[in-house]
Image (cartoon, rainbow, N blue to C red):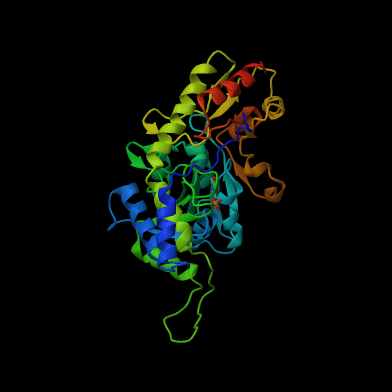
Amino acid sequence: MGKILLSTPTMHGEELKYIQEAFDKNWIAPLGFNCDNFETEMCEYLTGSVKNFHALALCSGTAALHLAFKLAGVKRGDKVFCSDMTFAATVNPVSYEGGEQIYIDSERDTWNMSPEALENAFKKYPDTKVVALAHLYGTPSKMDEIMDICAKHNAILIEDAAEALSATYKGRKMGTFGKYNIVSFNGNKIITTSGGGMLLTDSKEARDKAFFWSTQSREKAEWYQHEELGYNYRMSNVVAGIGRGQLLHLDEHRQAKEKIYRKYQEELKDLPLSMNPYLDYTVPNFWLSCILINKDCKVSPMDILYKLREKDIETRPIWKPMHMQPFYKNNDFVTAGDNVGEDVFSRGLCLPSDIKMTEEEQDYVINAIKSCF
Ligand SMILES: *Cc1c(COP(=O)(O)O)cnc(C)c1O
């Protein structure tokens, strides 16, 4: 048995077919038919429509977030309400534009942004116009509540669905709720292009504007004419071929991820811990299975992490909340009372959730976890 990892790419072969086509046509460039088709196929997958929904393939999810914040009009000094417990990529692009993140605590039912804390933040900073929401580990957030609050305060919602591609909330896919949304195809995500991301929006104008920025903001002129700051953010036509092949297997990946989660849930049920929670009217993509150790239990996540590392099993702490990061020590943090993020961080752990993991390997992981209690 080799090292058991958290989540690694799973390729199927179709990816190579699309790459081969790019080679055959010598279309080894950013932009091109694979990018165009990947965008169309993603819109179809997410909404069933290519008329009312638009995608822009980019070199990373972070680039997509950056353009989303630009589209939302975030400027120097503007406050943005951001998920607190998430990967830094959700929130860093706010700083690229000189904005200021106000961190919103999590709630216990999904570990995502607390609607109550968000309301409190609007009381404190009523002029805030942008909310950036991440769905942790593929678990949908409390969308009805969050959308209502955003509508009430006239705020633009940006959905970071980097971890939640294929997850649904009341039947609707994540990445389609916000005015601007993003997904990621980084190497560890549920489908991957080695690296890449997509911006998703119902506004064709917004998609066109983001396309313009992502291709160096070249004005329509024979010479190189620039009236705005530009970026080189487009996805390569070769890489998009991987994405097209992967998209064919997205639902199959989701099912395999769920199977892993269910097995952990069943086999660990007698231990003093619980699995990462979700709402029963949502379907997570179960990107990563996580555990939360009971409060009264003496075993800490790091005890398990070190012990499993000795057995060649990779685990990882929950995303350390942004308000606890030294880089963001001056940013405000708003809660609904107690500090949920800090508590989950102190008791939570991500488990191996690689869909190539065999039953025997997962049994090995489960036994290793049991031996810690
Ligand atoms: C992976 C991830 C991103 C960033 O995506 P990249 O494609 O790696 O730039 C953003 N937000 C969250 C929550 C992520 O997990």
Quadrant of the drawing holding the N terminus: top right
Q: Position of residue 154 (x, y in %)?
A: 41, 53
Examine the rendered structure and indicate whether residue 19 appears above or below residue 354: below
Of the pair 43 and 21, the residue shown nearer to us: 21
Total labels: the figure holds: 0
In the figure, residue 318 lies in which quadrant? Answer: top right
Examine the rendered structure and indicate whether residue 272 appears above or below residue 59: above
Residue 156 visible? The answer is no
Examine the rendered structure and indicate whether residue 338 appears above or below residue 207: above
Examine the rendered structure and indicate whether residue 138 appears above or below residue 125: above
Residue 352 visible? The answer is yes
Q: Position of residue 281 (x, y in %)?
A: 36, 30
Of the pair 326 and 42, the residue shown nearer to us: 42
Horizontal arrangement in the rendering, residue 264 relative to residue 206 (left or right): right
Q: Residue furthest bottom?
A: 222
Q: For the point 32% across and 38% down, which residue is it?
A: 171
Of the pair 16 and 323, the residue shown nearer to us: 16
In the figure, residue 32 lies in which quadrant? Answer: bottom left
Q: Position of residue 69 (x, y in %)?
A: 50, 59
Q: Position of residue 47 (x, y in %)?
A: 31, 48
Quadrant of the drawing holding the C terminus: top right
